[in-house]
Amino acid sequence: MSDVTIEYDLPATMRDGTVLRVDVYRPTTSGPWPVLLSRLPYGKNTPLMITLLDPMGMARKGTIVVVQDTRGRFASEGDYEPWTFESDDGYDTVRWAATLPDSNGSVGMYGASYFGNTQWMAALSKPPELKAIAPTITWSDPDDGLFSRGGAEELGFNVWWSLWQGFDTLMRRHADDPAAGAAALAALVRDVDGLATTGYWELPSGRHPALQRHQIHDLGFERSRREPEWTASCRVAGRHGEVDLPSLNIGGWYDAFCQGTLDNFTAMRAAGRPANLIMGPWTHGRFDAQVGDVNFGTAASGEALGFRGTLTDIQHGWFLQWLAPDAEGGDGGPVQPLLPPVLLFVTGINEWREEQEWPLSRAVDTEFFLRADGRLTNDPPQEGEGGDTYVYDPADPVPTTGGAALLQEEFRLGPLDQARVEARPDVLVYTAEPLAEDVEVTGRIRAFLHAATDAPTTDWVVRLCDVDADGASINIVDGVVRVAASLGEFAEHEVDLWSTSHVFRTGHRVRVQVTSSNFPRWDRNLNTAETAERATGWRPAHQEVAHDAARPSRITLPVVPAS
């Protein structure tokens, strides 16, 4: 262990002359030491940094830690645009960090969400000194959880995040006029505070009036629709083979980028790269044992990880393998790997489990069919069972109630009781009989709906729930797909519910919800032919979901056989 010195706001000059500011934590004893770098737009002193990886603690263990405000944010110079500069700036900063006094020349990167993606962008730019990355709770394809999902805008995330980033933007804009700055910030505060009651409801959702009022950048949905090629500035999907580095991928089952974490891991393994995966029961940026309505137990916390150590401990040992392989472990011997290839938290039984792969090859896709009278069975429907109908009205959408989402703080996330949702007339509910034994579902879940609408476009939302012995229905995963439709014609629609690892306990029941909205997480489909960038009017849609022999609507669960 070593004492630490901290240098604040050191200048790192990018290739175009822009100066980005960094804080450097370093051991007071002489090196050479490996370097850990994180680049984020939220302020380099944010408490979130300590949650992910404690810079002071890492420096005391013999690591130089560099934390940087990205371009145009807080202490750094330049014009702020989400994503645009992260590849070049990441490359330049890695090379700069590798030359710090007492550096051993090897750099690793860490961080979550946006600053999980800055790692991928730097890795894709290939600075030679970058040796390992540990992206946490971040995406692979921005159109699968960041900007949109299934064709629907991630409205709850996009608008809330964009408004919050506007505070630093407005302070910079009005730096020379404090009175104007105070008025602008007060107006922005009003819009942030009013999101749940008014802001999310404003139209057009695809060119949001609040962002226009304040003239601030959106997260990327709007720009990606205007400039599809620009999306490459934060897309990892399809490019993993270009990253010849080990990666430690950390995610949560109730995280907004759950599937992206899994996809990044599987793609890196498929490319033959060393990769590890940790999946806890967490929501976005919160690595707690209590998640939503469920207490998963002390071992579920990011401070425990099944009593393997904190997230900082785990990352420290993992990084030393790649950045300082000759370093000594705590017993004076070489550092030993702390992780299996895959470490999963299995909800329901609330246990960590080590695996050698993801997805699990032993999982068996098992179909559960929607049936008449709200039943859900492994037996397919019979001839003449027909279907169920409801009216979806964009003026009264199904409210977001938990889930793997990220939006304004008034909305609770994670696993929540679904009673309020399931009591609505525009939510179809299908429930299996109580289970005679535990059933584990681990892997990716998909639903296939044979459905019709009288609108030119509409959404289909499917949610998987676990109903306990007392009748409480708790959400596990969900998904959405936005479709173009022909009046009254049935078509089969696939809905990707992403992935989980969950055990339905003996006596519990498997339940599936089908509806057409989850607002404000996803923008309301207004059921008109206008695009989200222009639409301001709406109409109700009459929906029908079939479940007969010719049109077997169903959900496919990857069931892991009992050992």
Image (cartoon, rainbow, N blue to C red):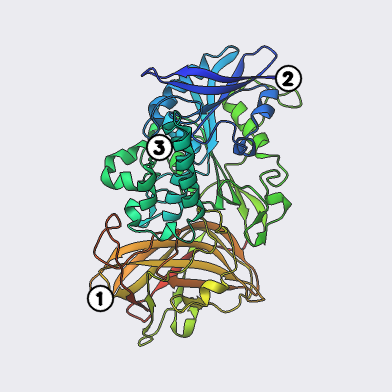
Q: Position of residue 372 (x, y in %)?
A: 44, 84
Whole-Å distance between the Cαs marked 2 and 1? 70 Å
The reply to whether residue 180 is in sight is yes
The kind of residue tagged 1 is Glu
Q: What residue would you read off at disc 1?
A: 489
- Residue plotted at (36% across, 85% down): 386
Q: Looking at this view, is 352 or 300 the one in front?
A: 300
Relative to the observer, which residue lies in front, 10 or 74? 74
Q: Quadrant of residue 313?
A: top right
- Residue linked to disc 3: 82
Q: Earlier in the sequence, mark 2 or mark 1?
A: 2
Identify the element where label 1 is drawn: loop
Mark 3 to mark 2 CA distance (whole Å): 36 Å
User: How busy is the neighbourhood of tag 2: few (under 14 within 10 Å), some, or many (20 plus)?
Assistant: some
Decide which of tag 1 and tag 3 comes sooner along the chain. 3
Q: Residue furthest bottom?
A: 384
Q: Indicate whether 437 appears above or below 15.
A: below
Which badge, 3 or 2, is on the more N-terminal residue? 2
Camera-nearest label, 3 or 2: 3
Residue 155, quarter of the rendered image:
bottom left
- The C terminus lies in quadrant: bottom right
**Label 2 sits on residue:** 3
Q: Which-is-in-front pick, marks 2 and 1? A: 2
The amino acid type, in three-letter code, at marker 2 is: Asp
Q: Residue furthest front?
A: 179
- State the image coordinates of residue 226 (x, y, percent, origin top left): 26, 45
Q: Is residue 209 above or below residue 417?
A: above
| Of marks 1 and 3, the one in the foreground | 3
* Image location (x, y in percent) of residue 401: 53, 64
How many residues crowd around disc 3 within 10 Å: few (fewer than 14), some, or many (20 or more)? Answer: many
Left or right side of 112 for 544: left
